[in-house]
Image (tube, helix red, strand yellow):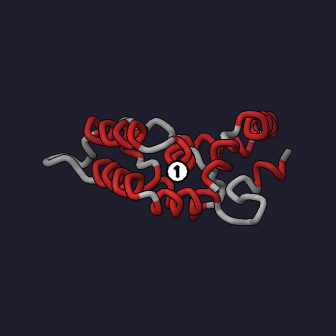
Amino acid sequence: MASIVSASSLSLDGQNQCLKAAQDCGLFEKCGSLRSEYVVACTKRAPGSAHCNRQKCHRALRRFLERVPAEYSLGVLFCPCTDALCGERRRKTIVPSCSYQEREGKPNCLSLEAYCMKDELCRSRLADFQYNCHPSPCLRLAA
C-alpha cells in the first residue's frame, strides 16, 4: 500500500499525471481557455484587498466544470500529486488556494495530507482510499 501513496503522482509509464492532464487540457481549446480563465479569476487580487474575489473564482471554476468534458476537467482538478514541485504547481494554477482556503488560515488539503503521511493509521487509510476510490478510470479516458 505504501508504494501506491509514494508513487501516486506518476502513471504506470512514469509520466506525471498532473502534467499530462494539463497538457491534454491544453490541446482541447475550450478546456485550455476556460482553465486560464479560472486561474486568472482565482489568482488576481480583488481591488483594495490582499485576497482574491472568491465569488468570481468559484464562478469561473463552475464554468470550467460545466463546459469542459469530464475526461479533461476531472483529470486536471483531481490528478494525484505527491512531490513538492507538483504540489506547488497544483496549488498555484490547477487548484488555486482562493478556491478553497479560508482567510482565517484553515488547513488545506496538501497540509492535511502531509500531516496524514506522518501518522501510520492515517497513511494506511489514505493508501486504501487512493487504491479503492481514485478517479483513475476517468484519467484513462483522456489517455
Question: What is the x, y in percent for residue 101?
Answer: 41, 39
**Left/right of residue 105 with respect to residue 138 in the rendered view:** left
Question: What is the x, y in percent for residue 52?
Answer: 27, 46
**Left/right of residue 81 with respect to residue 61 in the rendered view:** right
At x 39%, y 35%, the residue is 102
At x 46%, y 48%, the residue is 95
Question: What is the x, y in percent for residue 68?
Answer: 43, 44
User: SS of the residue at dot 1?
Assistant: helix
**Residue 88 visible in the snapshot:** no
Q: What's under tag 1, amino acid-wise? A: Val
> How many numbered tags mark residues here?
1
At x 52%, y 41%, the residue is 70
Provide the residue designation for mark 1. 76
Vertical order, 45 against 133 (above or below): below
Quadrant containing the C terminus in the rendered view: bottom right
At x 26%, y 40%, the residue is 56
Q: Crowding near pointer 1: few (<14 within 10 Å), some, many (20+)?
A: many
Q: Residue 87 appears in which quarter of the rendering? A: bottom right
Q: Residue 82 appears in which quarter of the rendering? A: bottom right
Question: What is the x, y in percent for residue 45?
Answer: 23, 51
Closest to the observer, 130 or 118: 130
Closest to the observer, 87 or 107: 87
